[in-house]
Amino acid sequence: MASPATSFSHDPSTNRDWITDSGATTSMTPHREWIRNMTPCRVAVNIASGEVIHAVGRGEVWFRPTI
């Protein structure tokens, strides 16, 4: 999970969509409430702008896809 203050420039509470990337090994969300079995961790993540942000936790997200 990334800190919403650093990972998104918009208000994350208004976006409830999850865009999947079938080639990704991990994904990030600013929605802590979506994560089950979260354990704290601090992992550096390089983003497209060249900035480094930090994940603050790791866990599982269960969802029902709409196709």
Image: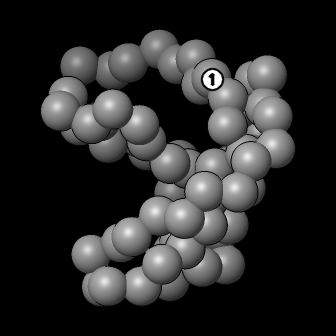
Residue 30 in sight in this render: no
Give percent across and percent down for residue 12.
59, 65
Q: Quadrant of residue 23?
A: top left
- Which of the 4 image quadrants contains residue 37? top right
Query: Element type at marker 1?
Result: strand
Residue 14 image offset from top left, x and y in percent: 58, 62
- Vertical side of 55 occupied by 60: above or below: above
Image coordinates for residue 29, horizontal then vertical, percent = 55, 50
Q: Is residue 15 left or right of residue 33?
A: left
Q: Residue at x 27, y 75 (%)?
A: 48
Q: Could you say which is closer to the camera, residue 24 or residue 10? A: 24
Q: Position of residue 57 (x, y in %)?
A: 73, 45
Quadrant position of the C terminus in the picture: top left
**Considering only vertical position in the picture, is 40 above or below 35?**
below
Q: Is residue 38 left or right of residue 23?
A: right
Please tell me which residue lies in front, 53 or 3: 53
Q: In the rendered image, which residue does mark 1 sit on?
A: 60
Looking at this view, is 63 or 38 the one in front?
A: 38
Position of 54 compared to 17: left or right? right
Residue at the (52%, 19%) spot, across then down: 63
Mark 1 residue type: Glu
